Image: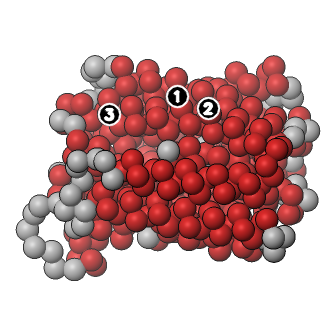
Amino acid sequence: MSFLAVMMHQVTRGWLVLRLTDDSPFALSLVIMAFALPLTFVSLLGGAFADRFSRKNIVMVSQSGNALLTALLATLDLTGLITFWHLIVIGILNGTLAAFNMPSRQSLISDIVPAQSVMNAVSLSSSGMNLTRVLGPALAGVLITFLGTSGVFYLIAMIYALSVLFMSMIQAGGKPSGPPRKGMRSDIREGFRYALGDSTLLGLVIMGFVPALFGFSYLSLLPAWAREVLDVQSDGLGLLMTVMGAGSLAGTLMLASIRHLRRRGVFLFVDSLLWGVCLFIFSCTTSYVTALPFLFFVGFTSSIFMAVNMTLMQSYSSQEMRGRIVSMALMSFGIMPLSAVPFGAIAEKTGTPDSLALSGLLLCVFTAVFFIVYPKLRKVS
């Protein structure tokens, strides 16, 4: 339910931004930045909370907050009072809630399943998310036509409320056991020392930042690309995001079915390279027929990368440090604005296809460089 709400929110918000800003790709990137920046600055605190308090309760409180914020956004839109800056402020608040939600949600997986099943469980959880990437955008794109953006936002708020109900049924994620804590700042410093002292974990954290900087530009620029290249309406944008979600679903389902994946470090590098190549080729397409297959593989490769990287970080961290280590991985989502805004500005000047092409090329280059200069990660089994 929560993932369905997020995916529907992404399409509806993007469509509302385009309506308010005369189809500006730069405005889209600013809204993405508003959501993602708190993940950089607040996720470490969210990780410390996940290692200190009930993970289940943290998720429930944050999802309740999302329901209220989305209902407020719907009301502003319905009454005609909505402005672009409302989206920025609400995006910051949504991102802050996500910074507390995501470390606890991911760490819950390791609380539920045995260690040998973590990769399959993370992949299965990602499959649930990616199923909503198929259904959510298509549903939102069609519903916008009938209900308008305000009506869809009200529906999203109700779906968030349902996610709280279902989370309340989970019998896991209580208050973590462990030695007494000194303070939040001490917890965060301890997490950094732990990651810096383990070369494998440090490499996984750094590797997570490479696609965050160069691989996720398509998330903020896809609506602008669709309008610029294909001249689509809301249902057409929903179709594009649905195909991308189908690729992500296929990737994580494949990963969830693999019992043993060997040489996962090398696999991670190869997947990141393929991601960059698919993104570059997609940027050069000019029709649905050529765009959809490569958009499918962009979703396929990106979802596999995120699932494997998250699995390795959980597998190589101790139970009492897991929330803080996961929060470091989630910081990479907050770095997205560092790429979303410059690539949005490039798209404004040279066109969205050129900006996406540069993004894919840089992802390939920096992945290859890190593969060469950090041999420790290549040895991860």
Looking at marks 2 and 3 on the same chain, the residue that comes earlier in the sequence is marked by 3
User: Can you say which quadrant of the picture contains the C terminus?
Assistant: top left
- Disc 3 from disc 1: Cα separation: 14 Å
| 323 vs 222: above or below | below
Looking at marks 2 and 1 on the same chain, the residue that comes earlier in the sequence is marked by 2
| 156 vs 311: above or below | below
Residue at disc 3, secondary structure: helix
Question: Marks 2 and 1: which is nearer the front?
Answer: 2
- Marks 2,1: beta carbons within 8 A: yes
| 335 vs 208: above or below | below
- Disc 2 from disc 3: Cα separation: 20 Å
Rendered image quadrant of residue 324: bottom left
Residue at disc 2, secondary structure: helix
Rendered image quadrant of residue 372: top left
Q: For label 2, count other residues whose C-alpha is less than 10 Å away and answer few (under 14), some (14-19) or many (20+).
A: many
Q: Which mark is residue 348?
A: none
Residue 97's x, y, as percent?
Answer: 47, 66
Which residue does the numbered mark 1 point to in the structure image?
A: 249
